Every structure is written in structure tokens, then in C-alpha cells.
Amino acid sequence: MHSFLEYLKSPELVVKVQEFFGIVYERNKLKKATSIANGTPGSSSPRNGSTKKGSMANGNSPSVTHATSTDKKIDDNDNAYRVTNYFWYVLFIVGTELGDEIFYATFIPFWFWNIDSAVGRRVVMVWSAIMYVGQSLKDVIRWPRPTYPAARLQKKWGLEYGMPSTHAMVAVAIPFSVLIYTYNRYIYSLPVGLAIALVWCTVICVSRVYLGMHSVLDIIAGLVLVILLMIPLIPLVDRLDNIIVTSRWSPLIVLTVSILLIVFYPDSGKWTPTRGDTALTVSVCAGIEIGAWLHYHLGEFQQPAQPPPYEIIWPSYSMLGLLLLRTVLGLCCIVASRAFAKSVSYAFVCFLLGRDKNELRQSENTLENKNKIIVELSYKLFTYGVIGFNTQYLLPSVFKLLNIADPIPGHWRDTPKSSGSQTLHLIQRTHKSYPHTHSIHHLVPRAGAPFLVCKNALSLFSSSQLTLSDTNGTVPI
């Protein structure tokens, strides 16, 4: 068993996967060419000290400056390689970005503003919990990423440890939590949903080995770990979201727990960006939950016209236009708020510590540089908390004011205003459903609705009135 695990962990297996998908190592050709030239098989030094592909003097690997092939690339460890199949190369480069900050920064807001924020909050909470456990274990286990003879086709995340692969964990957590939380809420084909989730997961996992960033064992460990974590997380998150949204002191508890999770993050033994990335995921989740809490306590939740499941109706051109407008405007505001919040919070914390912000920003990243660690973590907790809050509360409110908000039934919460009073209360669902939360600010008139719309749930009468129709009559909003 030990030898089998070592094989799965070995960089040689990574090389086999890379070569299967069209990565050709130039060093192999060089070794064969120089061996023939010297008349000594296996020799790596040519007679004249140089080769066509590059200098091999003193046994060094070929330098990229001596390369004659325009396709030839070189990594940080002087591993010369060539990409021969650009389909796989592009697919895996795109696939690995599905676990990057850019994807999170676009996918999460898009889902909240255009599809279903009730599902979105639960998915974000699962994602944040999975990332925290995975990133923490990396710094506890401290297994390095694959090295020679495997080439790294990507430099990003190279400073982090490799075991387990959080890309593999997120590759399961996001698509399958979306699938689980939406299956009894919307009418769609489960086999199609499973197929999409499996393809999504497979592309991301293989991309990490293809790029030389993880061993096969890293991927397997990440997949096993995320499955074990999601079994209790899925029902726990469902209940925890309702508790956070409805409890009076939730913001204080959420902020305290978020800070404690980052303060007592495991020691990594060396500086890595892992702790900062974990602070990002925790703060985004906290900001989103606080935004939902504010919606609830301002009395902005309303019951959907009909209970789930909802039928999916594809949008018209005008609906797509409004969807695009919300997305572009919202993402521009997210970028602006990130830049402003980062600048203000970074300067403020530097002021409290009595340090010059420019000098501190340019200082070395080490565990001994405590001031820089405090500033980096503080600004990330604040900045990404603001982004989460804006995604859930502020920007949808702006969309309402601009009359471009999204009245999707899937967005409405089944915590309705009672017909006998204006108080809010929870409705207990059957085991095939669960409470869904979103604000009434999406219940504003506009021409049409986007992707997910319940048939006969909406009746648009004029530009100034929206009503919900059900078997009990019409309730004006």
C-alpha cells in the first residue's frame, strides 16, 4: 500500500499524464541526441558542450535563450517542454481558472443577481467551509507540489503546499451543491445536471495534474475529503443559513467567528498566500450572510406565488439585455468597491500600526514580518466582506432604484408576510424542499424575467404595478 501511495504521489506519474495530453519534454530528445553524438548511451553532456536545442555544458539543462523551436517553453526548474496539442492546453488552462478568484468574483455575483440568491448563499457557505478545511490542511500536512522531472506549466499558487488539492475540492463542492440545492426547487433533467457537474469536476481535476501543480494523490485526497465533508455540510448549511438570517445577534457572531478563524489559522512553517486566500473566502461568506440578515430584519422578504419546484423558461432578448446590464453594472461596482475598500483599509491599518503603507507593501513576505501579515489579513477581511455585502444587499437595492431588478420567483423567500398581519414567519417545508431566502427588492416591475421563472407566478399589469397571483387571490406588492 505504501509503495502504491508513493507511486500516486510521484512526479513521474504527473509526467505520464502530461505526455498523454500532448506535452513533449525536450530534455528527452536532447539526452538521446547527445548520447548518440558522444557514442555513450545515457550520457547527458555532448562532446562540444552544446547542442542544437541549447547548451548542455557542465550537465546543465538547456537554456531558453538557446532554443531554436518557437513552441518550446521552460519552467522555473529549467524543464524544457513543448505543447503539441493546444486543444487540451487551452481546455485545462480554462478549467483551472474555474477554481480561481476571477471565477468566484464573476460567478457568485451573477448567480445572486440573475438566478437564485437563496441557493447562492448556501453554495457560498459550502464553498467557504470546504476551502477553509482544505487550505488549513495544506499548511498542516506541508507536502510540496510536484517537482522534477514534472514541469509546471503555471506559476500561480506555486508557493502553496499541494496536499490536498483545494481545486479538486471546489470542483466537487460548487457544481454538486448547486445540483443538490436546486434539484427540488427547479424542474430540469437530473442526468443532464449530473453530466455537467461531472464534466466540470473532471476538467478541473485533470487540469491540475496536467499543469504540474498537483500529484494524482493530491487530487484523490481532495476528492475523498470533500465527499466526506459535504455529507454533513449540506443539511447543516441549510439550517445554519436560516439561523444566521433570522437571529437577532447574527452579525456580531458571524464577524467574531470569521476573525477567530483567521487569527487561529494553522501555522504553515513558511510564508504562503494560503492564509490570505482563506481570509478572502471567509469574509465573502460573512458579508453575504450579513446582507441577507439585514434584508430579513428590514422586513423585505415575501412568499413566492407558488411553492417549488419552478419551471425553467428561457429569456427573451429584452430579458437578456437587462441581465447583461445588471451583470456589467454590478461587476463594475464590485471592482470599484474592491479598489476603494482595499485602499482605505490598507492605509487605515498601516496608520494604526504606525507604518508607512508603501514601505510595508514592498517589504518581504515572511512569517517574521508580522505587521505586513496583520495588514494583509485585515484589508482582505474588510474588503471582501464589503464585496459580499454589496453582492447580497447593496447592489440589488441599486438595481431596484434603477428599475432593472430581477423578479424571479426563485429569489423570493418562503418567509411570507401573513395575510392576517404584517409579521414574518417561517414556513416548514417537506423533506423535498427547504427554505429559500431573498429580498422583496427583486419584486419590481420590468419587461420580462430571465432564466428561471415559474409559469403563472407573475402577472405584469403595467409599468407601475406588479401582482402575485395564486389560488387565494391577488396580492399587490
Image (spheres, grey):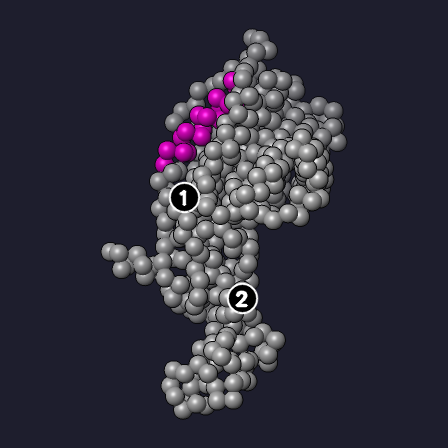
Q: Is residue 64 above or below residue 183?
A: below
Identity, as a three-letter code, of the amino acid under mark 1? Val
Where's residue 215, x and y in %? 40, 58
Q: Give the number of the disc on residue 474.
A: none
Where's residue 439, x and y in %? 61, 25
Q: Quadrant of the N terminus?
A: bottom left
Q: Which residue is mark 2?
A: 75
Tell how many labels: 2
Measure the C-alpha gap from mark 2 to mark 1.
27 Å
* Residue 304 sits inside the magenta stretch: no
Left or right: 240 as drawn, with respect to 440: left
Q: Nearer the viewer, residue 86 or 118?
A: 86
Q: Residues within 10 Å of mark 1 (few under 14, many from 20)?
A: some
Identity, as a three-letter code, of the amino acid under mark 2? Asp
Residue 230 occupies which quadrant of the picture?
Answer: top left
Q: Which residue is mark 1?
A: 140
Residue range (magenta): 231-247
Q: Which circle, 2 or 1, is nearer the viewer?
A: 1
Residue at figure coordinates x 56%, y 22% from the top left:
251
Helix, strand or loop: magenta stretch:
helix
